[in-house]
Image (spheres, coloured by chain):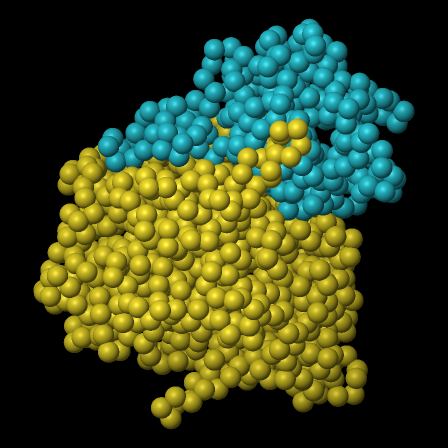
Amino acid sequence: MRIRRRDFLKAGAALGAVAATGMPTLNAFAAGSDQKAGGMGTEPGKWIASTCQGCTTWCPVEIFVQNGRAVKVKGNQYSKQNDGYVCPRGHMSLQQLYDPDRVKVPMKRTNPVKGRGVDPKFVPITWDEALNTVADKMMELRKNNESEKYMLLRGRYSYMRDVIYDVMTKVYGSPNNISHSSLCAEAENFGAYYTEGMWGYRDYDVSNSKYVVIWGCDPTNSNRLVPAMIKRFGDVLDTATVAVVDPRMQTTATKAQEWLPIIPGQDGALATALAHVILTEGLWSREFVGDFKDGKNLFKAGQTVDEAAFDEKETHGIVKWWNIELKDRTPDWAAKITGISKEQIIRVAKGMGKAAPHVVVWMGPGAAMHVRGGYSAMAVNALNGLLGSIDNVGGTLAGAKQAANSIPKLDKYLDEVAQKHGKMKKIDQRGTKALPSLNEGKSGGGSIANNVATAMLAKDPYDIKMAIGYMNNFTFSCTGAQRWEKAMEQLPFYVHITTNVSEMTQYADIVLPARITMFEKWAYVKQKQNRYAHVSLIQPVVEPMWDVRHDETEIPFLIAEKLKERGFSNLHECLVNEYKDPETGLPARTGEEFALYSVKYYTHPAWSEKGATMGDRINGWEDYRQRGVWNSNPYKYKSRWGGKFGKDEETDGKTTTKGTVSHKFEFYSETLKKALTGHAEKHKTDVDDILKACNYTAKGELAFVPHYEPPFRYGDEKEYPFTFIDYKSRLNREGRSQNSPWYYEFHKVDFGDESHEDMLQINPSDASKLGVKTGDMVKITTVTGSYMLKVKLWEGVRPGTVAKCYGQGHWAYGKVASKEFGKTPRGVNNNEIMPFDTERLSGANVRNGGFTGVKIEKA
Amino acid sequence: MPKYGMVIDLQKCVGCGACALACKTENNTQDRADGQTFNWADFLMKAEGKFPDAKFTVRPVLCNHCTNAPCVEACPVTPKAMFKTADGITMHSDARCIGCQNCQRACPYSTTDVEKDQAAYSVLSFNAHGGTVHPFYHDKTEVVPGCTSSGAEIAQKAGDTPPHRTLYKHPEYESVRRSGISEKCIFCEHRVKNGEKPNCVVACPASARVFGDQNDPNSEISQLLKKHKAVQLKNNKGDLLKAGEKGTQPNVYYIRSFSVRK
């Protein structure tokens, strides 16, 4: 192993020293318990701050280090979000750092045949050979005038992503930096953007709430803000009514006052019916929405209302929404298709209305990531508007600003090739007629990661010749995963930057071993929760276990050096010039220096005067390293009230709008109207035609309001009578904890599941019809194929649906994760069971909404 | 003298598993094998009712540190390898343990083989005579030979087994137990004696676990026991002690309900 003693010493001067061997030893200042009580106690060690990336809560943490080993994890005591606690994922991270199957050295493939179950016959190589090979391939593409055929695939990331994702790809000269973001959430963000003008996750003021509706997610378990929610939830059950909308009795539903076990995909029906009751019962927020001019409620089922009769305040289009959609969305109507009784719909709607504006409607992926989920996402979020809870005490919030620098301007580093090829069409087909992907109002504004495999196979708009992927495993993590296997088989050259030999690594030509986040890496993340935004540092707390490098910064720097040797120096110049150490002004000379200087560049505002004006005062870099986190001031309630849900900006004489077009909270989305009309004009057609191409049923004005769309399903109900529900294990560190023995030992904390198993949950009434009991094997068939699974009888799933936890089914990754490494999976991957489709308006990957029909046969 | 005990507030508990995992990182317990769980902290799950009125309860479990501890009674060694400390902790001496497993057989919350008995959990686990402790980190298999590591290599490289071993000292028990002896939760006495709470308590993100002195009327645990009707486990099948029933006088109590749904 290469010894990087000097850098580690320099960086770690205040935190922990290393011995000459490169292995850290105890430092003189290390403080543990001093074993005062009869010679008993914890031996000396040191808590060092970093950030957990086990989910997107991105918890500031502290790691206890003894003798240079990471031994325990807790929440960062300075964090204003997690109050010093982590969920189970934090503890599990130790088994990732010390995973026996981590890649130790760069590798190259010696078997040219690629395929599932085909041994790549990897052999170890030097970093020099690996990087030379990568740089040669990149130069070849530029020389052949086809640099667009280079692609960067990003999975999980830190905010150091800018370097590998944006800077390297753009300066090199490719349009193809593809983010994974659309895999898990963009339809949610669509719902928020086309109502409240925010493309991003909402924050929730649960402690001050009187009614909390958890919709299609399980925040005491997964999604985001997990420890903050766990911390508060026991008390919230005393101070608020909690209602959970989910077809499955997940953790939060188990504990809550109300469980609404909705039929998958019918979220839009329930949301519009709740809105209907809130309006007919006169329970909307007068302060936020306004009132009828004469104070008399004219919202009566089935009757249209004169728009002029209503004086609207902070919102736009309430009467239009009523007339176009809501007037017929009665609880009777909804009860028939949602599986939720009329009484429960009315009870919950009234409860929400009476608690307004202190109501949280927490929209999760289950409400949005459907084939036709864009409008149900809007409908669910619109409830927050009706109740005036947007930006209100005990309501749904945007986030405070984070003190961090943004990406430097790249223009002067873009040569002719980069300018020309960087502007070519992106491989994911975003912005084409049937894939509007309207991120922030722009046609083709967001990535459609899972469509890349389809586009690669179709070579449309062109063929991809080389890809670099990091912290991703699309061959496992994308629905219709089988397509990715085919796409990777035919990809001529793939470089995988990874910690483990994952499924996607099996298709790699070159494997570059990465430092593991949280323990070995310099990086930082931004997040918000519980009214506070944070800028949290990820730093090396132990010496890297193996000959590994920083994925997002050091490796691009090393590639830049190699490109420079080959006559293309722009990337190197850019990195050296733009990411100087903000303390000394010095440019980086090595990849490791670059990893450190670049994180200092981005986080500089957090530990300097600028940060102090926005939140915590942190006295310089060393102080920031000690604390590990900068917290903002609390988000100010009602920040966007008064017409600030959108803002017009003038650039070069052109007016663009960020947020809503009306600058108000929109029930009639002028913003979506503008976006859809723009997309239709681009393709010389009308909005009706676009919606049809996008598999929506709406026509006319319905396109611009949150409305009900019947769910789209793969597999007709006759042949595939059951509906599949995918849910996430609370022990998933996204896709990266399945090689941990603890993952299997405690799988029972995923309610309804059993430890050491990967089971299909089925309602006992259905099971008795099929003649199966817990532990029996069944063959399940969907449009993608057939799979063998053990069944678990569980009253927590609705009859007619079957649920399965996502996480298992690896055929690579490691010897714990797979049954036979490289060949046989342990369990079944939900992403093989579910077919690929896209919520086309947002570009989101479909995972929910009952889109997968299942046939079950006793095996 | 304090009388230590624990109250677990089930309304606060979300059954997440953090306590049990934090215990594993603190006490370096090995992976489940041969009918032994090695989970000093674990969970009992209970499903009741029918859809849509289904109910589910998670009950975190650990050694009950019984006042009338049958494991102590059953220990044949003199002085006893399993004994009560003055603070009420049921303590285990690694040095004196002869590995007879009488404690496992006597404890109503334990079994000698969870698989054979289909038990949900066992407070006591036994490190097999002559067995390898933490075999996971002795395994030499490399999934990609010469390129990926192995359990044995990573332990050697990190410098300990398990590689994330938390080092602590205690006169009675080791931070990793040897083969041929039993082991269980000792209320993290190495922490408690230094004014720290057990690691499962400080790690619980819901603050559902309250550890303290039942003899101090002002302690949080005493206050909670006064305020709420508490129940205690009778065995590892999930049965509870009935009102007036003493059982082994367990010192772990449960208050409130996991679900608030009527």
Nearest to the observer: residue A622 or residue A128: A622
Residue A579, x across and y down, in percent:
32, 68
Q: Residue at x 28, y 75 (%)?
A: A410
Colour chain B appears in: cyan
Q: Residue at x 35, y 63 (%)?
A: A597
Question: Residue B77 lies in what quarter of the image?
Answer: top right
Colour chain A appears in: yellow
Q: In this view, does A62 lie to the left or right of A602?
A: right
- How many numbered dots are placed on residues in this image? 0
Nearest to the observer: residue A513 or residue B165: B165
One can see residue B27 in this view: yes
Nearest to the observer: residue A772 or residue B235: B235
Question: Residue A436 lies in what quarter of the image?
Answer: bottom left
Q: Relative to A79, does residue B143 appear above or below in the rendering? A: above
Pick out the residue farthest to the front.
A28
Q: Relative to B190, does residue B204 appear above or below in the rendering? A: below
Residue A631, x across and y down, in percent:
57, 64
Pick out the residue farthest to the bottom.
A653
Q: Relative to A282, does residue B58 appear above or below in the rendering? A: above
Question: Residue A561 lies in what quarter of the image?
Answer: bottom left
Q: Is residue B201 left or right of residue A405?
A: right
Q: Is residue A318 left or right of residue A722?
A: right
Nearest to the observer: residue A752 or residue B74: B74
Pick the quarter of the image with the N terminus of chain A.
Answer: top left
Q: Residue at x 67, y 51 (%)?
A: A231
Residue A8, x across and y down, in percent:
36, 50
One can see residue A724 in this view: no
Q: In this view, does A535 lie to the left or right of A279?
A: left
Residue A244, x across and y down, in percent:
66, 53
